[in-house]
Amino acid sequence: MNGLEDLQARLVEAAAWRVRLTESGTRSTPEFEAWLQTAGNQAAWAQVSRTWNYFDEISQAPEIMAAREAALNDARRASRQQARPALLRRFATLAAAALMIGIVGSGGYWWLNRPSDYSTAAGERRVVTLSDGSKLSLDADSEVTVRYEKSERSLRLLKGQARFDVAHDKKRPFSVIAGHQKVIATGTAFNIDMAGPKVLVTLIEGHVVVLDGYEEGVAPAQPKVIELKAGQQLSAAPRLPSEVAQANIQRVTAWTIGQLMFDDEPLSSVVERVNRYGGTQIIITDPKVGAMKISGVFNAGDVLGFVEIVTHYLPVRAVTEDPHTIALESQAKKDGAM
């Protein structure tokens, strides 16, 4: 048996002990303590326990149930190949029973509310208190649908940006679909930004898991589950692997108090966000101008103030195209025309 096979075998045994102890309502037994003393078993037990304890809070989410079912199927297959058949057969039986209970229970779903749709226009922000006490904050030009069920609170961010302050309810996980990401939580606060080409999921406090590459109605064989810690941001872009990095929470949530904060960002993406707040629109036709970097704090909706600062600090000039449009052009273009 190679190292990987040995690890898999120990994880299966640890999972079997986890189920057995949970079923009996005991923390330990002499047999378990003896098993735990074998080299390598403590690490396997710690890994299984961390996953078990964490996912207990969101165990009723349908996708987590599906992932657990796949794991149980893997465990059953592995149990037929391991050296401790009695214990592992017991684990497979218990797993099958647990799965059957979940399937039967799923038939009891019923609607508590009809789907609701919340949206904002350009330049508008909105805060909605949902029926469970959760708060939904919508940025300008954003839209969210809300559908609450008996066992799950399901939302979908269709466009724009929103902050979710989730009321704790262990029995009803709170999930938000944005693009190909599904965020699952029970009680926490997080921000999702779909304003640009990327989907940005930022955890403000608490903890969430994200199903990366999620497609509604499609159950991947091995869904990629990413856990975020407070202060982390998941960045997901088309045709690129998702990345997790530390985020500036103050900058991410500045929009909730009417500010826009940028840190060395391309002028093109900054202008795209500024334009979402209505009023005079800014256009950039020169890729070199769009690639210029800018940092600063601006008031959302103050287009003229933004243009004044940009033209002061960057080598660009503002050209009024019509009463509703301002073009940003390179100063070199003006100089070349002289």
Image (cartoon, rainbow, N blue to C red):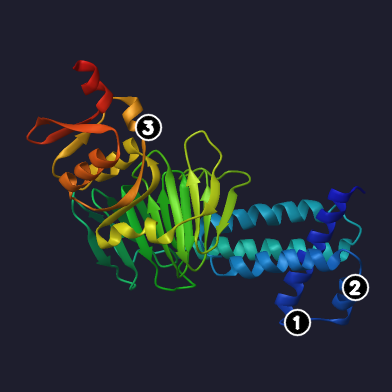
The amino acid sitting under disc 3 is: Ala
Q: Earlier in the sequence, mark 2 or mark 3?
A: 2
**Residue in the image at 22% along x and 57% along y:** 125
Image point (63%, 46%), residue name: 222
The amino acid sitting under disc 1 is Arg
Query: As displayed, is residue 189 above or below residue 338?
Result: below
User: In the rendered view, would you say 184 is above or below 42?
Assistant: above
Q: Is residue 81 visible?
A: no
Residue 315 position, x and y percent, is: 29, 33
- Residue 188 quadrant: bottom left
- Identify the disc placed on residue 300: none
Secondary element at tag 2: loop
Circle 1: element type: loop
Residue found 24% across the figure and 56% down from its top: 118
| CA distance separating discs 2 and 3 | 60 Å
Question: Where is residue 248 drawn, in percent x and y?
Answer: 44, 57
Residue at the disc numbered 1: 27
For the residues labelled 1 and 3, say whether their Cβ atoms are less than 8 Å apart: no
Q: Find disc 2 in the rendering and name its residue.
A: 37
Tell me the crowding category of disc 3: few under 14, some 14 to 19, or many 20 or more residues within 10 angstroms, Cα based: few
Pointer 3 residue: 291
Q: Nearer the viewer, residue 113 or 192?
A: 192
| Farthest-out residue, top | 337
Q: Earlier in the sequence, mark 1 or mark 2?
A: 1
Q: Position of residue 310 (x, y in %)?
A: 26, 41
Crowd class of label 2 (few under 14; some 14 to 19; many from 20; radius 10 Å): few
